[in-house]
Amino acid sequence: RKHIDATLGSGNVREAVVLPPGEELCEWLAVNTVDFYNAVNILYNTLEEFCTACSCPTMSAGPKYEYRWADGVKVKKPIECSAPQYIEYLMEWIEVQLDDENIFPQRLGAPFPKNFPDVVRTICKRLFRVYAHMYHSHFQKICALGEEAHLNTCFKHFIFFCQHFNLIDKKELTPLQELIDSIQWR
């Protein structure tokens, strides 16, 4: 329990996720999506030597939740793959989205596509799966590495942001619902 309660000293996370006055919604979604991608990437990279095709032959979040990969372009029909393979596909897919100026414009004032919130929803739903996998399959290792405060802080920021902007369907959150419920009132 103390490992779950561990968070780095930070301000009010609920206030931190709110759209600042004068900020454009898509810009705020974009900046935070990039930050969430980077945070998950860094956290997962510390586990790469422990999350292998042998130790994690399927991308899962406990025994009830298994995820299959499809990107709709290269892989149209969802495929079963190991957790590290799924996460590699995911991070590459997100990087392609982030690097595509038609989706994530780099020029100041350039318009975002009309489907931008949907793209962000898909990215967040998939990043959530990585958090769910890390908590369910690797939390003991995360604690042994002394990373639980960082993981918990990043997840709390991510989940508050996703809930505030309604980016992930409630049913998708089920694998970590108990954890989410426990951080709601802190």
Image (cartoon, rainbow, N blue to C red):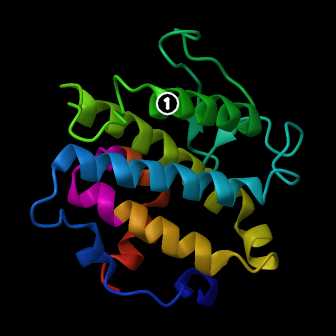
In the picture of the structure, the residue carrying the numbered disc 1 is: 99
Residue found 23% across the figure and 25% down from its top:
113
Relative image position of residue 155 (x, y in whole percent)? 48, 65
Q: Residue furthest left?
A: 22
Can you tell which quarter of the image residue 21 is in?
A: bottom left
Q: Looking at the figure, which quarter contains the C terminus?
A: bottom left
Q: Is residue 174 magenta?
A: no
Question: Which amino acid type is shown beneath numbered disc 1?
Answer: Asp
Q: Nearer the viewer, residue 18 or 58?
A: 18
Q: Nearer the viewer, residue 60 or 115?
A: 115
Instruction: Say whether residue 54 is left or right of residue 168.
Output: right
Residue found 71% across the figure and 56% down from its top:
137
* Whether residue 151 is situated above or below residue 133 in the rendered picture: below
* Whether residue 37 is situated above or below residue 184 in the rendered picture: above
* Whether residue 56 is situated above or below residue 95 in the rendered picture: below
Which stretch appears magenta?
A: 160-171
Residue found 56% across the figure and 17% down from its top:
78
Relative image position of residue 4 (x, y in whole percent)? 57, 80
Relative image position of residue 153 (x, y in whole percent)? 50, 75
Relative image position of residue 41 (x, y in whole percent)? 64, 51
Instruction: Say whether residue 19 is left or right of residue 65.
Output: left
